[in-house]
Amino acid sequence: MESCLNLALSSPEAEPLRPSHQDLGVAFEEFRFPLLSVPECNCGANARSCFFRDYGIKVCNCDFGYNQTNGYCSAICNEANCIHGKCETVGNGFKCRCNEGFTGQRCEEKVQTKLNKQDLWMVLLLLEDSYFAFASL
């Protein structure tokens, strides 16, 4: 064990100090801490682990497909995430696969199909041609 130096302010010389076990016991006695009551750490059934950080902040390490919400492991995907589609877990988040006819991050927008003027004229010409073809039979 290395020796410590006891430097007295009034003395220019330093003398080695070798603490005995009794001295160490006294030193530890000065640093007694009261036992703290630690609250139970519970993040729910879908948690891998639970612990408290500094200042009592609870941290949940959740299974894949779950993340910490209000101190518990909750499913990332739920019915409310995707209005007209299916929710899929991607990393720590989710993505919506929209049903046909819907778009948007949460499948909230109905797809609007607009015909431009050229397409409209083409449809009218086809209808006119088929009408005359049918009428001539």
Image (spheres, rainbow, N blue to C red):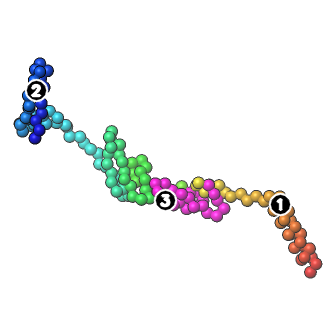
In the picture, the disc for residue 7 is: none
Residue at 41% x, 51% y is: 68
Q: Left or right? Give the position of 27 relative to 84.
A: left
Query: Which element carries disc 3, helix, strand or loop?
Result: strand
Q: Residue 107, percent across and down?
A: 60, 57
Number of the front mark, 1 or 3: 1
Q: Earlier in the sequence, mark 3 or mark 2?
A: 2
- According to the picture, the residue beneath numbered tag 1 turns out to be 118
Residue type indicated by callout 2:
Ala
Q: Quadrant of residue 111?
A: bottom right
Q: Earlier in the sequence, mark 2 or mark 1?
A: 2
- According to the picture, the residue beneath numbered tag 2 turns out to be 14
Q: Nearer the viewer, residue 116 or 66?
A: 116
Q: Quadrant of the C terminus?
A: bottom right
Q: Left or right? Give the position of 54 relative to 116.
A: left
Inter-mark Cα distance, 2 to 1 = 99 Å
Residue type indicated by callout 1:
Gln
Is residue 127 positioned above or below 78 on the image?
Answer: below
Q: Residue 21, percent across and down?
A: 6, 39
Inter-mark Cα distance, 3 to 2 = 66 Å
